[in-house]
């Protein structure tokens, strides 16, 4: 999905205020409890691959900015030119956001959903019963000051634990960070005995919606139950079951 | 505490592999659910003040690196020269770590507790019943590649919610990030009905210790109960009650 220009991650990521693409990604392995993440990387074609390298080849969990890219190079990953990430659609989105900002004054601008969303994520259950989750995002159009979103944070945008579930979120990242949303789904299952569907619905439709946070999540448990709640108009999503055909949806069922 | 050269935060922060001081800090307001954090800042005398500015003056939660410092300047904060953070003790600690690394090969080095610890944190209950938590850290001696620790992450190193507790952690940050430790204390109280002491003990003495993570936390609830569990030899800690004298401890009671 990072390679598709349709999504806000990898190629096709949104532009920052300064016309750069700064990307965040996290992976969590529910079998081992290990995790890797990167934030603010600018020359990595597939940030989720770098997050995985952090998990597998470093003793750390989160590497940021230039340092993360130096690590990438030491591990043999090729850096790409910033031009690789350019798409006219995202560039025009930034120009529109900048024009609106000039007109309205910085604090008056309300971002459209399209400016905030488009993060990609995946959750998986393998045949051995292991869960894993991964999330990758270019963040928000016109973001400033090295803003990092929930996609770089274990527990906020991504969580996996074989005892409960695997979760990946999308939406207005600040709300997901303040609510530690992905981990919260697992906590409700582990500590309150909720089912996956109940826990995910409680987090998105009660907790997040009460605080006026917008977005959704995809989650799967060890039995293969999955759920994809969201409180926005739509959420691009799909699933694939063993031996089945891929199913893709946008709006509510 | 950031101004004291004794602690690994602000002046007296540990040095990175490249001989820099890169600092992380987070603040969470339990009354409003708002939060602010910075990671990898190099010219901010008091990173926790900048985290608070992020919370109060930006629409974001986490700002990193140079971008965070540009935000600081736009909000009128003065940057300080890197020399401000220098202490001979921390510089010597780095030289020792580098020598050990040269001798042993990178992957063989096991950091001493002193290289990993020394984060400062505070949790507070005010007279109106509001909880808040804050954490600030220079991270690990000889850290590389833009490594960021739990002190920059809402939910990992810092949490506050008026419904449960305020928590600040110290220790080997990677374990706290993988375990979403600070938030977990609140989740055990909210979802399992544990007391503050039970929840904090469960997280440190069961969950963290089982995974061989070292460290501790300080936590307070709305009734003013407080607890400071740790699984290391000691943890510098203190408390102050209304009208009382400050109490300071290092080892177990």
Image (tube, coloured by chain):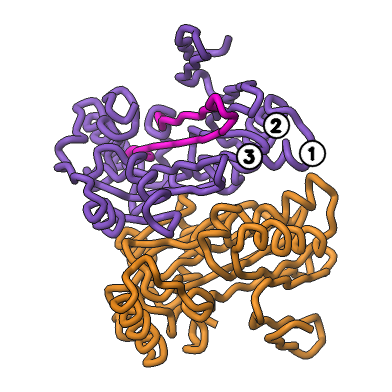
Chain colours: A purple, B orange
Q: Are labels 3 and 2 on one chain?
A: yes
Disc 3 and disc 1 in contact, CB within 8 angstroms: no
Give the x, y percent position of residue B251: 70, 85
Vertical placement of residue A131 versus B249, above or below? above
| Secondary structure type for disc 2 | helix
Q: Residues within 10 Å of mark 3 (few under 14, many from 20)?
A: few
Q: What is the number of the mark on residue A211?
A: 3
Q: Quadrant of the N terminus of chain B?
A: bottom right
In the image, is residue A160 part of the stretch drawn in magenta? no
Q: Quadrant of residue A10?
A: top left
Give the x, y percent position of residue B174: 51, 60
> Closer to the N terminus: mark 3 or mark 2?
2
Residue at 24%, 57% (x, y): give it. A70
CA gap, disc 3 and disc 2: 17 Å
Identify the subunit bearing mark 3.
Answer: A
Give the x, y percent position of residue B246: 74, 88
Identify the subunit bearing mark 1.
Answer: A
Please state which of residues B188 and A162 is positioned toward the viewer in this rendering.
A162
Q: Are labels 1 and 2 on one chain?
A: yes
Disc 1 and disc 2 in contact, CB within 8 angstroms: yes
Residue at 46%, 74% (x, y): give it. B111
CA gap, disc 1 and disc 2: 9 Å
Please state which of residues B94 and A136 is positioned toward the viewer in this rendering.
B94
The residue pinned by badge 2 equals A199
The residue pinned by badge 1 equals A192
Q: Which residues are magenta?
A: A118-141
Please state which of residues A111 and A223 is positioned toward the viewer in this rendering.
A223
Res B130 visible: no
């Amino acid at each position: 999905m990072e390679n598709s220009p349709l999504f806000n991650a990898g190629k096709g990521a949104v532009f920052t205020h300064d016309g750069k693409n700064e990307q965040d990604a996290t992976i969590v392995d529910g079998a081992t409890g290990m995790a890797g993440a990167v934030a603010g990387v600018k020359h990595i074609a597939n940030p989720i691959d770098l997050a995985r390298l952090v998990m597998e080849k470093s003793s750390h969990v989160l590497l940021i900015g230039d340092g993360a890219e130096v690590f990438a190079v030491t591990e043999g990953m090729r850096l790409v030119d910033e031009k690789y990430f350019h798409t006219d659609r995202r560039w025009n989105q930034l120009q529109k956001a900048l024009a609106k900002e000039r007109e309205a004054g910085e604090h008056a601008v309300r971002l459209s959903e399209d400016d905030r969303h488009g993060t990609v994520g995946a959750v998986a259950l393998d045949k051995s019963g292991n869960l894993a989750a991964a999330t990758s995002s270019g963040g928000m159009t016109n973001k400033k000051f090295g803003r990092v979103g929930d996609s770089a944070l274990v527990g906020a945008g991504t969580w996996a634990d074989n005892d409960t579930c695997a979760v990946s979120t999308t939406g207005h990242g600040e709300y997901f960070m303040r609510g530690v949303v992905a981990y919260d789904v697992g906590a409700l299952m582990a500590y309150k005995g909720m089912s996956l569907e109940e826990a995910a619905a409680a987090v998105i439709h009660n907790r997040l919606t009460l605080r006026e946070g917008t977005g959704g999540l995809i989650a799967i448990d060890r039995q293969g139950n999955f759920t994809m709640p969201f409180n926005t108009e739509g959420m691009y999503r799909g699933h694939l079951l063993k031996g089945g055909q891929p199913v893709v949806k946008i709006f509510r069922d």
